[in-house]
Image (cartoon, rainbow, N blue to C red):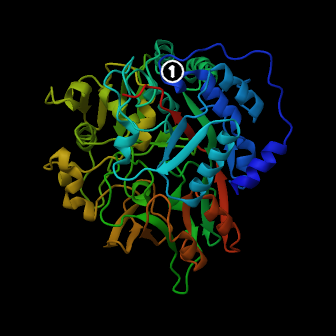
Amino acid sequence: MFDKILGVALAAALLSAGPNLATAQAINSEPLSDPRVRQAIAYAIDMDTIVETLFEGKAIAADSMLPNGPFKPDGLNPYAYNPDKARELLAAANWDSSRELDMVYYYGDQLTADLMATLQAYLGDVGVKMTYRKLEGDVGAQLTTRPTNPVDGTSNIAWDLGYGAAAATALQEYYNPYKTGGTSHTPSDPALDGMIDAINATADPDKQRPAYFELQKYWNTKLDTLPLYYQQLFIYESKKLNRNGGSYGNEQYNYDADIVNWTMEPDANGKQIMRTNTAPPQFFELPWANLGIWITSKVVFDKMLSADGSLSVNGGQLAESYSVGADGMSASFTLQDGLTWHDGSALTVGDVAWSIKTALRVPQIHAVVENTFTSIEGGQAYRDGDADDISGISTDGNTITLTMSKLDPNMLLTFTQFAILPEAHLGDEDPLQLQQSSFWQKPIGSGPFRIEEVQMNDFVRYVPFENYHGGVAKIDEIIATPSLDGDGNLLKNAGAGQMDYGFTKNVADVAALEAMDHMRVIAADIPYTRMIWFNKFPRK
């Protein structure tokens, strides 16, 4: 496949090289710290051809870390395929053509292996040798171990190029890790630090937008990381399912799809049964790190607020009302009256306060959630173990109020994704060992469906929660089989009529699903960018 792609690309008309080379220089002894080398690698790769051939048109070539939309400026350099320009930049940077770059990746699918071979061919054509390997073992440590000195220290990782992705809940997530000391591969840049501070300095989108524009224009020249393509999400449904006007959106997170009004074509017994995947193989996962990947996170656990398909806040869920201070430094949420857990006990603001505090003591929570909760007055000290309580949390009747020590531009977004859990069932557990609680064999929530039956590593059966504040769901049962993000049994189950709803990012699965007469596939543009990281720290 990659030979075909390279042949097509080489036969294409080349862009003119332009009169001027980049004037930037390497910042240390590592040649990849020279922006001209990174720009050359960008020009060497024909992403348009890769998208049309390897990805069968089911991806979008990227010109920014951010997805297409109102926060991206016009006029960014797309680094359209231009191998002559790549060679010119490499010559100007005195690139050593005998050097062999080590590319690492962590995906196990054939498409990624094909992409690696394709990239190897493109880079080889301009004089950059590259080998590639899939990481095994502790992948996180191999990718993210930071240098002791993030300004002018040496690398603590053993690779040159890394292929991976960023799936953002909030747009700041694309850039926040690049502040000084935040990555394993990018040395300190005070100018970039200031631009990252600017996108976090306000919750007003109209004020955020020019800050994002400035940052992306700077990044587009410097290319600390090379965005390759935007991966789309593909929602699949059997034609027996009717959303009855319910919206489509970013299925990796939680949004208001109005699932209580979904219906299924009744079976021979007159029951509406929807079959899906992403049930747990061994235990239900604490829903504070991977916020919406699992079906349980979507239907069992409610949140304070709801969001639309693009993850913009669109109203209350558990909260009847909410308000944010004019300066963004406080927020209040008032719960609906009469809320209950699936076991019939009352859901109170005490559960909300306990959930926030406990989330700050568990080993891992989502970065957006963590930033919100550590921005509460006393939140960071509580997370660090330097305080016994969080001074910025107060409750009065059905209302919980948060006082912030610093502005968090995504505070409301957090409360559309953060699941509230029952203190009565988990309050005596050690937060550091919360995932080990027996609660996670059959958890209790407050969402539209409750767990009726669990056959671990076989299936989970969910039924409507009769006292749900949003009305009783019309579907009689959801039966979910275990799978991770990327279901190896998807095509088999879909072909047998045993898959009515789910999502995938696997292009090969999409083509096979589209060929099934009883299935339909809906493409969703999501903030999910695949990229190449450059290790710009010198080696020890």
Image coordinates for residue 435, horizontal then vertical, percent: 24, 53
Q: Residue at x 55, y 72 (%)?
A: 499
Above/below status of 151 relative to 83 = above
Q: Please state which of residues 204 and 150 is positioned toward the viewer in this rendering.
A: 150
Task: Identify the residue at horizontal 67%, vertical 46% (top origin).
Answer: 121
Question: Where does residue 405 sit, x and y in percent of width and height?
Answer: 31, 19
Residue at the far bottom: name it.
268
Q: Nearer the viewer, residue 196 or 343?
A: 196
Left or right: 222 in relation to 55 = left
Left or right side of 334 for 511? right
Give the residue number, with chain letter if any, for mark 1: 199
Quadrant of image for the N terminus = bottom right
Tell me the quarter of the picture where residue 320 sits. Answer: top left
* Secondary structure at numbered mark 1: helix
Q: Relative to 34, is 69 on the left or the right? A: right
Total marks shown come to 1
Q: Position of residue 497 (x, y in %)?
A: 58, 78
Between residues 435 and 46, which one lies in front from this camera angle?
46
**One can see residue 433 in this view:** yes
In the picture as drawn, the residue positioned furthest to the front comes out as 98
Residue 21's x, y, as percent?
71, 17
Looking at the rendered structure, the kind of residue marked 1 is Ile
Q: Among all residues in the image, which is located at the extreme right?
A: 13
Mark yes or no: residue 73 visible: no
Q: Quadrant of residue 462?
A: bottom left
In the depicted structure, whether residue 15 falls above or below residue 503? above
Does residue 382 lie above or below 136 as drawn?
A: above
Q: Quadrant of the C terminus?
A: top left
Q: Residue at x 78, y 44 (%)?
A: 9
